Image (cartoon, rainbow, N blue to C red):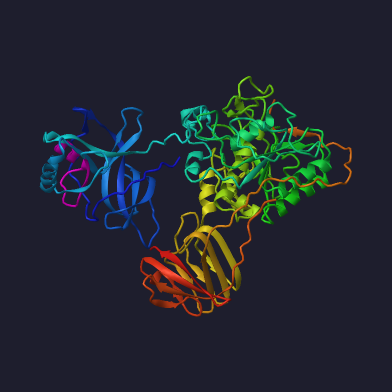
Amino acid sequence: MKPKLLYTIILLLNFTTFVTYSQDYYWYDDAKIHLTIGDKEYIVYEPHTTSPNNATGLLYEEDIVASNQQTLKMGIIAKDANLDIGRIVYRITSYISNEDSTDVFITDKFYVKLKHPDDIQQLQQMAITYNVEILYNHTLARWYVLGCTANTEYTALQMANIFYESGMFEACEPEFIGLEQPTCANDTYFESQWNLSNTGQYGSSYTGVDINYCDAHSITSGNENTVIAVFDWGVELSHPDLNIYPLSYDVKSRTSPSQIYDSNHGTACAGIIGAISNNNLGVAGIASSCPIMSISMSGGDTRTNMADAFRFATDNGCSVISCSWSSKNPSTILDDGISYALANGRNGLGCVVAFSAGNNNVDTINYPAKSNPSIIVVGAISPCGERKSKISCDGENYWGSQFGSELDIMAPGVLIPTTDTITIDGYHSVDYKMRFNGTSSACPHVAAIAGLVLSVNPQLTAKQVADIIESTAQKVGGYDYTTTEGRPNGTWNFEMGYGLVDAYAAVLAAKTKYIQNHTYQNGSMVETYPEIIAGYAVTDNKPYGNVILEAGSDVTYSATEQVVLKPGFHAKAGSNLHIKIEAATSHTTSDPQQVAPRTSSAPTDETNTTTEEVANNGLETVASEVIVSTSIYTISGQLIQPISGGQHDAAHLPNGMYILQHRMSDGSVRSEKIANNK
C-alpha cells in the first residue's frame, strides 16, 4: 500500500546538514518518551531535471512544496542507500513507534504551547536565539508552529526539547509523520477483507498482496452514473448493505424485478462490488458508489433469453457486466448477445464484460469466457499471491483456478468476506458470508475496478478499460512474466495472465494520460483524459523520449482538469495542436425505464449454466465548434507565438500559467489556461 503524507515542509535549499542526533526522546505530559532509532531515513531532495533517477532503496516519494514555492520531493529511504536522485537538502533517521513497531519520521517543524497568552515575547526571543522561525499560531489556543531554517543548529526534535526544558512553555513536541496505513473503511468485517487490505491475515509474509483498495478509495469509490450489472442467480434487492439500482431484470420471465434462484451466489458477488463502505456495517465494497443492477437467471434459461439479458443491461445504461458463471454448450446467439453489449454499450463506447475463468484447475478457460477476445477473463489467486490451486497456501485443496492462453487477469478468489441474503436462508444465518470463494468471487473484483476506472474517465472505450486493467497489473507470486505474442499490455504468464489486478494503479492510469517517446505522424489524433502530461520523462513506466508532432499531424488534447507540456514536447512547422479544457461529459441518469423485450418466440433449449463458485443511458453529446487556429499568450496577455505554422518547443517556456486562445470556426474566440512545469 502507498501511504499518504500530506503537509507542507518549510526549509531552505542550503539546509543540508545537522548535528549528531543525541537526544532520542521527546516530552509528553512532563515525562520523557524514549525513541528507538529505526533503519530508514526521511529525506527531502531536489530531483534531477535532465536525467532519470537511478535509485536503489527509495521506498516512497511524493512532491512537496518548500517555503519558496519550489517543488521538491520527499522520500523515505533505507539507511546507507545508494541514491542518484538529486541533491539531498534534509535528512533525518526514522524512529520506531512504541505502539505497533511502525516507522515514524520527524519533519523540520515543532510545536510550542505557551503557558499564558502574553508569553509570546518569550517565544519570539527564543526563536531569535536559536534561529528558528515562528510559522503561525495554531487554531488551538496558545499553540504555535515553528520551523527550522538554514541557520538552525539543531534538529526539530532537539529544538522541541530545548524549548520545553527551558521551563518557559507548557508543552513542546516535534512534528511526527507516520507511514502506517490508516484504516480506510470502518465496516464491521473490513479487517478480515484481505482482498482489499492484506495486513497478514493469513501470514505476515503475504502482507500487501491485495488489490490496493485503500489507495484507490482515496481517489474514488465510483459514482451513481456508473451502473454495474451482476448477471447471476439473483441479488437480494433489500439488503441494507448493498447499493442497489432501482431497475432489475429476470431472464426466465423477461420482466422486472429480478428473482433469487440461488440462496446467495448473486448477493455474494454483488457485495464484493457494491457493499456500502464506511457505514459501520458489514463489509466494504470496491465500487460502493456504483449502483448494482441485478439480472437474475435460473440456471435453465434459454439461450435467446440469456442473449436478450445482455441487450437489456446494455440498453438500460449499464457500464459493466459481471458474469460469474459458465455454460456447457457454446451458442452463437449467446455470443451475439455478449457482442452486442461489448459494441453498443455507453452509446457505442462499449460495456465492459468480465467473466470468471472456471474452477477445475485445468489449463483451459470455460465458455463463454473464452468466446470473445474483448471479454476480460478473470482467474483467482490465494492470499499469498499464487494462482489458486489444490496446493496453494489457503488450504482449500479441493479446487483450483483455471488458466491458459485466454486468461487475462487475476483477482482474489478465496476466503472473501461479502454479503449474504437476509430475507431467505443464505449460506449462513447471518447477513454476511466470510469465506466466499471460486473464480466467482474473483470476477466481481475486476468488474468493480472497471467501474472505478469509468467513474474517473467515462469517455474510455471498453477496450481502453481492459487495456488499463491489464497494463497496470501487479506481477505477484514469483512467476515468470514474459513478453508474449498477442499480449500487448505488458508481460504475461500462462497461469497468471498479466498478474494481480491493481485498483489504485488502474484508477491513476485512467485519470492521467502520460505521453512520452511518441511521434504523431500525418493524420489526426484525439487524446481525451481528465489530465494529460506530455514530455520527455513524465513517467517511469515507458521509455524516455520526446513527444513530436510531425508536419501534417493534427493533434487534439482534450482534458477536464489540465494539460501539462513538459520539456521534450515539440510541435514542428506544419503541425496543429489543439488543447481543450472543458467540463467532463457524463452519464445522465433519469428514472429507469425498462426496455421492452423482443417479441420473437423463445426456443426451448437450455443453457445449462453453472456458477463459478466451489460448493440506456450514455454519454451526453456536447456540440462544439472546430478550432481553426490556436495562439499561446503569457498570463498577462503578451503573445508568444501561434502554436501551428511554426516550431514550438514547450521547453523554451518558463514555468508558469499560460493562456491558449482558440479561434473557432464560427468566428468566436475561446481561451483556456495551461500549466508548464519543468
Q: Where is residue 618 in the image (x, y as percent from the top left)?
A: 66, 54
At horizontal 50% and vertical 50% (from top left) the residue drawn is 508
Q: Where is residue 630 in the image (x, y as percent from the top left)?
A: 50, 75
Query: Which portion, as a residue range, is magenta?
Result: 143-163
Residue at the front extreme of this rendering: 591
Residue 342 seen anywhere in this rendered image of the structure? yes
- Say which quadrant the N terminus sits in: top left
Give above or below for 476 relative to 65. Answer: above
Residue 474 seen anywhere in this rendered image of the structure? no
* Left or right position of 154 against 583: left
At horizontal 31% and vertical 32% (from top left) the residue drawn is 96
Is 272 one of the magenta-colored residues? Answer: no
Give above or below for 120 relative to 639. Answer: above
Is 160 one of the magenta-colored residues? Answer: yes
Within the image, what quadrant is residue 41 found in? Answer: top left
Q: Where is residue 160 in the image (x, y as percent from the top left)?
A: 19, 38
* Left or right position of 252 against 278: right
* Left or right position of 397 against 170: right
Towards the viewer: 171 or 95 = 171
- Say which quadrant the C terminus sits in: bottom left
